[in-house]
Image (cartoon, grey):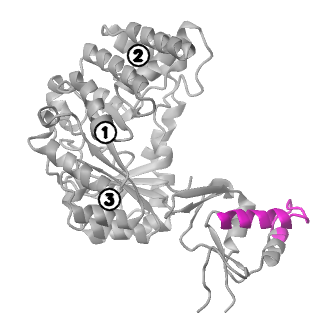
Amino acid sequence: MLPLWRNMSKEPKNPVANPLVVLREEFDQWAVLFNPDTAAAVGINPVGVAIWKLLDGQHSLDEIAKTVRDSFSDVPEDSFGDMKAFVSDLASKGFVGYRLDE
Amino acid sequence: MKTPRRVDIEITSRCNLRCRYCYFFDNPDSEYGDLPAAEWLKFIEELGNCSVMTVCLLGGEPFIRNDLPQIIEGIVKNRMRFSILTNGGLIDDDTAAFLKKTGRCDGIQVSVDGSTAETHDSCRGEGSFEAAMHGIHLLRSHGLPVTVRVTLHRKNVKQIDNIARFLLEEVGLPMFSTNAAGYLGACKSSASDILLSTAERREAMLTLKRLSDAYPSRITALAGPLADARFWLRMEEARSKSSPPFPNGGRLTGCGCSFENIAVRSDGSYIPCNLLPHLALGRINRDPLGEVWIENEILNALRGRSRIRLSDCEFCSDCDYIPYCTGNCPAIAYGMTGKIDQPGPDACLRHFLAEGGDLGDLLKHDLSAEADNHAE
């Protein structure tokens, strides 16, 4: 049965937003991610919001990075590492998991 | 902020008690009727869609509703957390177990006004102390986060030492919060029996300041004598040194609630705050929350209070504390003056001093505590 959401994975594939997490979009396109189970909250900027909306398990991190770079004129070409670190940080907090292979 | 982060819902207008200073009852503008659970659940779904983070359930007495678990399940299902304000008397073991099982409870605040039944029941009614303590015991036995609020009034103001010792040492609570009965709701009809006199207030400030130093970080206050003592000492120090104005000083900035929260009366009317029940902003399930939050003129006028300068308010004329003052709670201001766009006289330092109050003993205590800290 796919997609499965896990916050840990033996074979990480495409990142998936934890469906429990609430995206609170504020003014100026900034937002807060809120996990009601843990009460943890993280503030994210407009680029972070764009990444979050692509964490649907259908896109690889490479694809997400390309889409985000194409959408924001001020995101540098070599920002993949930063985006990967951002998603990893969210994963460590339980906001993001990885789709598993069957 | 496109929608409120927190919504305070008066989930019922019924209560098993009739506390003499309850802000909720005897408001001529309130309609005391309950909505069916289905109406609340529909609204709670809207809250979830609006990304509201937390719901505070109050009343009346929330636990008087038999369908409260159904309503809380709606909150959980819609990805929110919750807290509850209660007198504690209707909580049973099953209820406590249910609350724990949700995993979403931020806190349950139980009102306790004394260390004995005689003191607590004096304003809350016979048997209410025992019932509250039983409720606290059940909640804690299930590992729920319990907080206690002590409301000070003329019948318990001499008991503050005993109350602190009881709650922090005998009951073993990590902390408790304090405020004082205000000129709101049911209190208005017996204010002279309830509200602290200037002398009692001065005594309460000194006692609470001493206790809060003796029990560091275990006694809190957002309003009332302890909050006044802390803030007024800062104001007096700043005035005596002609310090620069405080960041929010000199304007009506005393309340930021309307920037983050909204409330709903038990009849389903939106209001800015539970202490301002006369300011109906619309109705749930008819007026979308997002529209009310952004567009309602009353709500925006309330937010605009922060632009009103105290120097333009007649009450503050020639006051030396203006640069350090925030004008206090708008609800108390309305209760006492009938005006929302004016400072509240209740937490006014100049007014307190003019009524015969003084900060002398507090200042001495503060200096002596500071000296003790340096000596250590």
Position in image of residue B151 (x %, y %): 27, 33
Between discs 2 and 3, the one toward the N terminus: 3
Tag of residue B149 = 1
Q: Residue at (36%, 14%) from the top-left corner?
A: B351
The secondary element bearing badge 3 is classed as: loop
Name the amino acid type tagged 1.
Answer: Arg
Position in image of residue B261 (x %, y %): 45, 49
Tell me which chain the residue with mark 3 is part of.
Answer: B
The secondary element bearing badge 2 is classed as: helix
Q: Is residue B374 left or right of residue B264?
A: right
- Classified by dominant secondary structure, the portion drawn in magenta counts as helix
Is residue B4 depicted above or below B171 in this figure?
below
The secondary element bearing badge 1 is classed as: strand
Query: Looking at the figure, which quarter contains the C terminus of chain B?
Result: top right
Q: Which one is in front in this view, the residue at disc 2 or the one at disc 3?
A: 3
Circles 2 and 1 on the same chain? yes
Of residues B213 and B354, the one drawn nearer to the viewer in this rendering: B213
What is the C-alpha distance between the residues marked 1 and 3?
20 Å
Q: Which residues are magenta?
A: A69-92
Between discs 2 and 1, the one toward the N terminus: 1
Name the amino acid type tagged 3.
Answer: His
- Dot 2 and dot 3 residues touching (CB under 8 Å): no
Between discs 1 and 3, the one toward the N terminus: 3
